[in-house]
Image: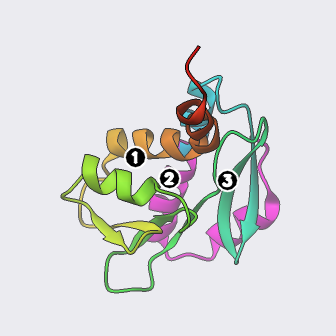
Amino acid sequence: MKDNPDVLAVIDRYPEEVRAAILRLRALIAETAKSSEAVGTLEETLKWGQPSYLTVRPKSGTTVRIDRDTSDSGDYALYVNCQSSLVSEWRGLFPNMTFGGNRSVHFRLDAKMPEDELRQMMLMALTYHASKNKRKAPSP
């Protein structure tokens, strides 16, 4: 993944603790993408003013966005397309986490970041379309 100066400028404007959490999420996304050949090329961009990560070659996944949480649910959050089944799947896998409708998972700065769970969520998001296509493929 190539650093996007516009994304880095947005991240630099966060308060220090939030910035540290967002930078760690960003690093986890990049590490997760590198760990799987199914993800392919990852692009960093801004969507709705939020740091966003999408697969471009192949288009294996759905966009992952990260941002400060402005709701009462947490201090920072990870967002995915609300039309995907990802948050529903994550609720089943990680019932003790805090979710926002069908589009986000929220975290508090005063709690340890659940990195193993986040890696699994990110891999599911970054391979969402590829996995969905495999599930739909007819049996031989």
Q: Look at the numbered disc 3 and give the secondary structure of its residue.
A: strand
Q: Which residue is drawn at 74% across and 67% down?
A: 46
Residue 121 x/y as whole percent: 43, 46
Q: Looking at the image, can residue 17 be seen? A: no
Q: Is residue 20 magenta?
A: yes
Q: Looking at the image, can residue 128 be seen? A: yes
Vertically, is 26 above or below 106?
Answer: above
Contact (Cβ within 8 Å) of mark 2 with mark 1: yes
Looking at the image, residue 138 sits to the left or right of residue 59; the answer is left
Q: Does the magenta stretch include residue 100?
A: no
Quadrant of res 51: bottom right
Residue 42 x/y as whole percent: 73, 42
Quadrant of res 30: top right
Label placed on residue 14: none
Q: Residue at x 67, y 53 (%)?
A: 53
Which residue is label 1 attached to? 118
Residue 1 x/y as whole percent: 74, 40
What residue type is disc 3 on?
Answer: Tyr
State which mark lies toward you, 2 or 3: 3
- Label 1 crowding class (10 Å Cα cut-off): few <14, some 14-19, many 20+? some
Residue 111 x/y as whole percent: 23, 61
Looking at the image, residue 82 sits to the left or right of residue 52; the answer is left
Quadrant of image for the C terminus: top right
Label placed on residue 25: 2
| Outermost residue to the left | 96
What residue type is disc 1 on?
Answer: Leu
Measured in 3D between alpha carbons, the distance from the residue under mark 2 to the one under mark 3, in whole angstroms, is: 11 Å
| Residue span colored magenta | 1-28
Which residue is label 3 attached to? 53
Q: Look at the numbered disc 1 and give the secondary structure of its residue.
A: helix
